[in-house]
Amino acid sequence: MKPYAELNREELKSLKAELDRQYEEIKAQGLSLDMSRGKPATDQLDISMGMMDVLHGDADLTCETGVDCRNYGVIDGIPEAKRLLGAISEVEPDDIIIYGNSSLNVMFDSIARSMTHGVMGHTPWCKLDKVKFLCPVPGYDRHFKITEFFGIEMINVPMTKTGPDMDMVEEYVSSDEAIKGIWCVPKYSNPQGITYSRETCERFARLKPAAPDFRIYWDNAYSVHHLYDYHQDFLLEILEECRKAGNPDIVYKFTSTSKISFPGSGIAAVAASRANLDDFRKYMRIQTIGHDKLNQLRHVRFFKNLDGVHEHMRRHASLIRPKFELIENVLSTEIGGLGIGEWTKPYGGYFISFDAIDGCAKRIVALAKEAGVIMTDAGATFPYGIDPRDRNIRIAPTFPTLQELEKAAQVFVICVKKASVEKLLEE
Amino acid sequence: MKPYAELNREELKSLKAELDRQYEEIKAQGLSLDMSRGKPATDQLDISMGMMDVLHGDADLTCETGVDCRNYGVIDGIPEAKRLLGAISEVEPDDIIIYGNSSLNVMFDSIARSMTHGVMGHTPWCKLDKVKFLCPVPGYDRHFKITEFFGIEMINVPMTKTGPDMDMVEEYVSSDEAIKGIWCVPKYSNPQGITYSRETCERFARLKPAAPDFRIYWDNAYSVHHLYDYHQDFLLEILEECRKAGNPDIVYKFTSTSKISFPGSGIAAVAASRANLDDFRKYMRIQTIGHDKLNQLRHVRFFKNLDGVHEHMRRHASLIRPKFELIENVLSTEIGGLGIGEWTKPYGGYFISFDAIDGCAKRIVALAKEAGVIMTDAGATFPYGIDPRDRNIRIAPTFPTLQELEKAAQVFVICVKKASVEKLLEE
């Protein structure tokens, strides 16, 4: 079939009639499918069930320093958990703090702390007239919601194939003291699945911020979340890079086991310079008596070490790879060459990013919803929920079964075609 | 023996010589004991070990509404956890939100939220010149640390046998708009083990605060933590009382299972009016994707219901009651009638509060430390760590074994006697 842009008005009209018919047909099926959130599927959860047995009623629940993990004590993580999460984060155990069940919560707290207490002795942000954050777009809606919640002004920075537009990042960060941070998902980014290139990382490490309390919020959520054995993206370890560049304090590196073990029942961590970690600890010592050490122990006993994690992640990959491949197949078969959409083909992470013709994303998501397929809201991948070109849609293929996904993908492509034809007919 | 105050100078001097000898003797034993923190002992932790087996690898991990507790979802608690914690808190399941592992963390977050976002639409506290909290004294050091951390001015309110001095509370709260809260441990209070009387609770419920965003921080940490079967303190349910008084929004009621199941691996909750809970949820939805539902399920499957909790608490009581009785015996045998100290005899909770002669607390704690017995720092039970009369010491008898506790108590009474004689000789 020809690209839609080359069709004349009559051809578009007859195509529209056919697509309307297909859409009504599929709507009549009364589907109820969800491609909206990056949730693991049930079969993925099943592979972690062994974790429920490692801390049984007769188990010794002391950590390697002899601390009874069932009682209060040890504010920043048991040593073996620091080693395991440190290995996942590619840092030394002393460069990491172990938290509770949610790295998002730690990011939120980092912003909250900066608001009320400032960063390492600098003015609390709530005392400043203006605080701004750079937001690579498309990006993670939950990040943007945090900065919006605290009244922080968000500035869009376009993503390229190698990460955020670094010319723009450097320009902003070096010239505006109100810019206090940037949200990054540097590996298998949400939603595009892009991994920042070596050059991008090096330029991040060498930033010369106007604000001494500027920090890179490096949310390495998908560090070990590869889809393939033979092709994996490589990401430079940013802490070491920042140290080498004489910028040791510029980055907070977040991680969690949410999509390794159980979402909501995993463990989270932050790696950063010793000075930053001391700043975190000052807050932490007042905020809590300590996090859940039994869950830390449970993770360590189950995974044992980084090899154990990698082996486990290969099992996840074998379950979700077919889902990514299915979406790729349907999209390329049904839409390839039509000039009505572009999408990413990530080697890891949880998402595929789809760019429709400008002005079509909201319509596509609405059509899909009407036909029983929930997609992430159009706009969600941008600050304030506003996609200036109304074209980006995040596809989350992991949660549905393959069978459901096949149906959902067929609905999606019909909606893309229908919305595109409607758009072209408007012109 | 006569009260110390009736001894003449010569008698005091010869007593001091004898006590110095006893002190040196006990110091020479090189003890290393800890009566400083309210930690359960190992045998108490052992009674919860069954909890490690209820969620085994073959268990169905869905909650009663069919939600898979292993995955994301359910922001404010699974229904059965709301029911269980609701029962512990004496409120309906809809009046409670389930959190993570630490109620202290929830209290901290409540203050942090009030600082940056205000309470139910009122001005954020960080925008105000002055924010003050009332602090019943002696009280819980961790509470005071939170308000101190946020630069909130703390005002001491003396505790009486029926709770805080309510004349003073009413006067302050009704006349000063800067007063935004009061810290309360209403049942088996920390450190005195006092339970607020019916009248005290009624007066709390009927407060007429000058500040519309004033809240009572009702930390009901020891609601089911009785020492005896036949004598238990009764506390009025405060939410209902506030509702009846036309003050439904005035109170946040905190609870946790920290000293029911495992400290640091329990679950926490807040009960409050629907309007307050909505305010909490707005923050929560941005702060996290959700708390650890598997741990909620684990607690519900282990305890089943409130009866199960009470039965479990009787086991705790049978382990710690002898420790409270030992302290009472040693204190009354060794110090009773000497006029050098008064102490509480609580029916529940985790602490005994000891008041020495004015100006002696720091010296006693220092002497005990030198002899190898760690007590809670003198002053810790007061805001800013300053006990104006330097007399209050918190005794935490639960963590040591009975044998250790016996030794620690003997050290303590020698230190009390020695410090008292020294004090009297100064005069």
Image (cartoon, coloured by chain):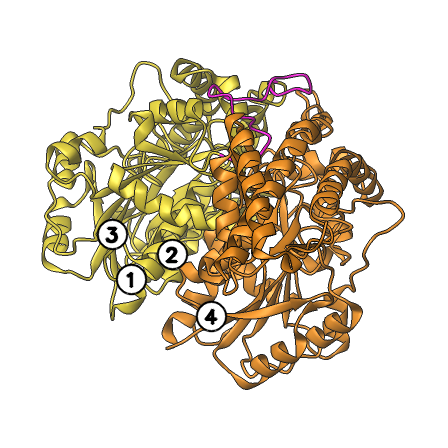
Chain colours: A orange, B yellow
Find the magenta span and give its range.
B54-73
Question: Is B200 placed above or below A253 here?
Answer: above
Q: Position of residue A228 (x, y in %)?
A: 83, 45
Residue at x 34% of width, y 32% of height: B96
**Residue B181 shows which numbered tag?**
3
Q: Position of residue B36 (x, y in %)?
A: 48, 44
Closer to the chain start, of discs 1 and 3, is 1
**Residue B154 shows which numbered tag?**
none
Disc 4 is placed on an element classified as loop
Closer to the chain start, of discs 2 and 3, is 2
Cα gap from disc 3 to disc 4, whole angstroms = 24 Å
Residue closer to the observer: A361 or A194? A361
Cα gap from disc 2 to disc 1, whole angstroms = 10 Å
The residue labelled by disc 2 is B112
Magenta-colored stretch includes residue B58? yes
| Residue B358 left/right relative to A302 | left
**Within 10 Å of the Cα at label 4, are there few (<14), some (14-19), or many (20+) other Cα atoms?**
some
Q: Are marks 1 and 3 on the same chain?
A: yes
**Within 10 Å of the Cα at label 2, are there few (<14), some (14-19), or many (20+) other Cα atoms?**
many
Q: Is residue B318 visible?
A: yes
Q: Chain of mark 4?
A: A
Q: Quadrant of the N terminus of chain B?
A: top left
